[in-house]
Image: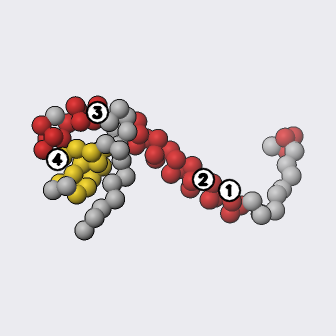
Amino acid sequence: MPNKILTEIVTSISELKANPMKVVASGKGMPIAVLNHNEPAFYCIPAAAYEAMIELLDDIELLKIVKERMDEPSVEVSLDDL
């Protein structure tokens, strides 16, 4: 069954086992697809790329909240009242 590989760089599990840091460095900060029997088994994602991805997911969740609340009535507040 054909699989879509979502990265430009791939490696085998054997290569990853032999020298994991070399494989990560070869991706130059981008995710690497790790293949098992020529099929993607998982993606190796550097910490910085993972952190950026999580930040984007958090931003998407916050955007959903903002959109849900856009039509809610607003309440005027004076700084003196605070």
What element does badge 1 sit on?
A: helix
Which label is found at residue 66? 1
Q: Amino acid at mark 1?
A: Val
Q: Quadrant of the N terminus?
A: bottom left
Q: How is the image coloured?
A: secondary structure
Q: Name, please, the residue furthest toward the bottom.
A: 1
Q: Is residue 38 left or right of residue 43?
A: left
Label 2 and label 1: CA atoms lie apart by 6 Å
Label 4 and label 2: CA atoms lie apart by 37 Å
Label 3 belongs to which residue? 26
57 is higher (above) or lower (below) than 50: below
Q: Is residue 70 left or right of residue 79?
A: left
Q: Amino acid at mark 2?
A: Leu
Give the quadrant of residue 11.
top left
Which label is found at residue 50? none
Q: Earlier in the sequence, mark 4 or mark 2?
A: 4
> Which sits in the foreground, 46 or 32?
32
Q: Residues within 10 Å of mark 3 (few under 14, many from 20)?
A: some
